[in-house]
Image (cartoon, rainbow, N blue to C red):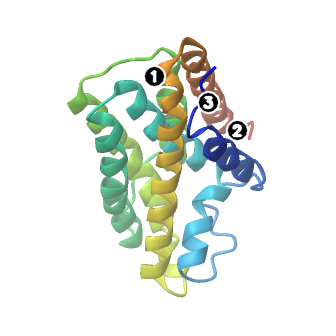
């Protein structure tokens, strides 16, 4: 039996995420400062965690070049959403959009949907606007908004990487089943936020 080289790293990441308290990442509670606040803030909001992991995981399902393009598209467009939030420009249905990102991306993973690259990038970009706007509305309250922004962009990238590492399990039938089950969990968490259960 071949040991997967990323299994230990992935399990460590999952354990770290499971120790994070469940809370919305965009409640503005605990915004105090700069880089460290920005780095930890997305990880403490399960609605954000599942969507960001899902982007990397769906990219892995789609394969190259999506495995790298989607995790680049998300933070780039998220920065646009953050700029809208900082500027006070309203975007409707922020909470709904964030919750739907988990539901939709989770279901795409469950059914191993292979969307064209352009469609996948537009869908991920659309969802990232909601996530970015939620974080952007908090930036003016941070003591160092630029450092805070760098922190949450890096956290986003690490969560995407977690999804990509999980996606490397797709090489085996059992791994494919685990990936699909992960997509199901993501969709359920998104649905819990969508219907106000979480």
Q: Closer to the camera: disc 1 or disc 3?
A: 3
Question: Gap in Å between the C-alphas at discs 2 and 3?
Answer: 40 Å
Q: Dividing the picture into quarters, in which one does residue 117 lie?
A: top left
Label 3: state its secondary structure.
loop
Q: Nearer the viewer, mark 2 or mark 1?
A: 1
Rendered view: 43 above or below 64: below
Side of 148 relative to 114 (left or right)? right
Q: Check contact, mark 2 vs mark 1: CB within 8 A.
A: no
User: Which numbered tag is attached to residue 3?
Assistant: 3
- Disc 2 vs disc 3: Cβ atoms closer than 8 Å? no
Q: CA distance from mark 1 to mark 3?
A: 27 Å
Q: Earlier in the sequence, mark 1 or mark 3?
A: 3
Horizontal and vertical percent position of residue 128: 40, 48
**Is 28 above or below relative to 57?**
below
Task: Kindly identify which residue carries mark 1.
Answer: 108
Nearest the eye: 23 or 12: 12
Q: Which residue is label 2 attached to?
A: 196
Considering only order in the chain, which callout, 1 or 2, is on the residue closer to the N terminus? 1
Query: Mark 2 or mark 3, which is nearer to you?
Result: 3
Q: Residue furthest bottom?
A: 143
**Residue at position x 48%, y 14% in the image:** 111
């Amino acid at each position: 039996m071949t040991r997967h080289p990323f299994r230990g790293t992935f399990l460590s990441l999952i354990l770290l995420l499971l120790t994070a308290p469940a809370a919305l990442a965009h409640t503005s509670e605990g915004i105090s400062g700069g880089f460290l606040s920005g780095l930890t803030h997305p990880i403490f909001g399960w609605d954000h965690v599942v969507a960001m992991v899902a982007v990397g995981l769906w990219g892995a399902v789609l394969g190259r070049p999506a495995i790298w393009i989607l995790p680049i598209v998300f933070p780039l467009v998220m920065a646009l959403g953050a700029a809208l939030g900082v500027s006070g420009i309203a975007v409707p249905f922020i909470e709904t959009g964030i919750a739907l990102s988990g539901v939709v991306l989770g279901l795409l993973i469950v059914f191993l949907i292979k969307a064209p690259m352009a469609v996948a990038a537009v869908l991920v970009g659309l969802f990232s606007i909601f996530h970015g706007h939620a974080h952007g509305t908090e930036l003016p309250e941070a003591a160092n908004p630029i450092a805070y922004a760098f922190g949450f962009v890096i956290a986003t990238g690490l969560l995407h990487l977690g999804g990509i590492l999980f996606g490397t399990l797709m090489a085996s039938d059992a791994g494919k089943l685990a990936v699909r089950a992960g997509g199901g969990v993501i969709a359920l968490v998104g649905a819990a936020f969508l219907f106000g259960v979480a």
